[in-house]
Image (cartoon, rainbow, N blue to C red):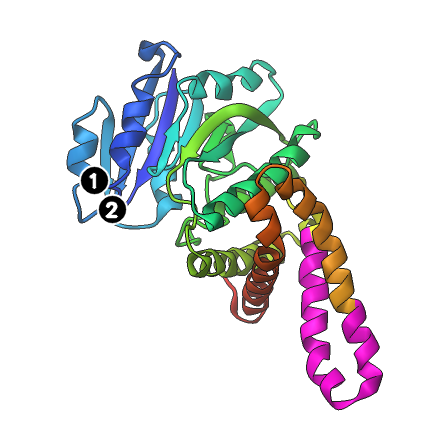
Amino acid sequence: MISVVIPAYNAQETLEQCLSALTKQTHPADSYEVIVVDDGSTDLTGKIAQDYAVRYIRQVNQGPAAARNNGVRQARGDIILFTDADCVPDNNWISEMLKPFDEAQVAAVKGAYRTRQHSLSARFAQLEFEERFELLKKADSIDMVDTYSAGFRRDIFLELGGFDTSFPVANNEDTELSYRMSAQGYKMVFSPQAIVCHLRHSDTIIKYARLKFWRGYWRMVVYKKFPDKMLKDSYTPQTLKLQILFLYAALLLLPLAAMWPAFEFPFFLSLTAFGIVCIPFGFFVGIRDLSVGLLSPVFLTIRAASLGAGMIWGVLYGSA
């Protein structure tokens, strides 16, 4: 038996598409169950869920980490699959997620994102994922399993205590669990054909910047627990870290350069270095989406500034 767990909070706009897709899987219908954990919704989430042949669990609002853990505790399956209420799995999603588990050493599996959105911000966000997917395809094992398309052996998940419920929102709680699994030596792999379509990539610059700020904040909370991952993990491009470093160096040097000529050269050097480390991603994006590629310097500047600000905030005030 396979158990698919979906946490849902005020998800009436997207849940039906998610559940409908899960009724059309190529995997035999009698071999998996779908569990919807309603995290105290105040809209029609519960009614929509109960219109489908799912196990419906309602809890007082405690956050997605607690909802997922609750679903796993009540699941019947030996393999637990997670997706989100705003994701639409491809018809072969369950089958593709299960294939890597044929290897006994595999403890967790990560699938892939796609989007049908057309805004520049959403397209840029998708290409960020595509860059990371290319990194993961080259790795025999990984250290990051995102909950939008994730699979775990139930016994290992429970042994590790599941997701850390001190993370109040859906932000880096999956990173924290992944790093814990990695520290214990468990094997995690990427299954690029296990695809879900995300319905809600950030579709404006403001939403994108806000998302990246909080990504930076919560990632720093995780890094405080796993400082070695700050230097390198399987999911984060090293160029991204350099972009943040060089952009903030330039921002710090700018007022000094305006007052003292001696700082002009370091300022322009930092700015030039930022531009250089943006080039690989610009090419990667440009050959896939020319419009986004031409705007990639703007997006990369916003990304580095937002992530950096969030990380600084996380260093100063972050705790889970």
Q: Earlier in the sequence, mark 1 or mark 2?
A: 2
Above or below, comparing residue 209 to residue 36 in the picture: below
- Judged by its main secondary structure, the magenta piece is helix
Measure the alpha-carbon separation of dots 1 and 2. 6 Å
Q: Which mark is residue 195?
A: none
Q: Give how far across and how far down residue 249 sits, in percent.
A: 72, 71
Q: Which mark is residue 45?
A: 1
Looking at the rendered structure, the secondary structure element under dot 1 is helix
Q: Which residues are magenta?
A: 240-269
Query: Label 1 sits on what residue type?
Result: Thr
Number of callouts: 2
Residue tagged 2: 10
Which of the 4 quarters of the picture holds residue 67? top left
Residue name at image x 56 percent, y 55 percent:
219
Query: Label 2 sits on what residue type?
Result: Asn
Q: Give how far across and how far down residue 256 sits, in percent.
A: 73, 85
Give left or right: position of 18 versus 301: left
Above or below, comparing residue 118 to residue 149 in the picture: below
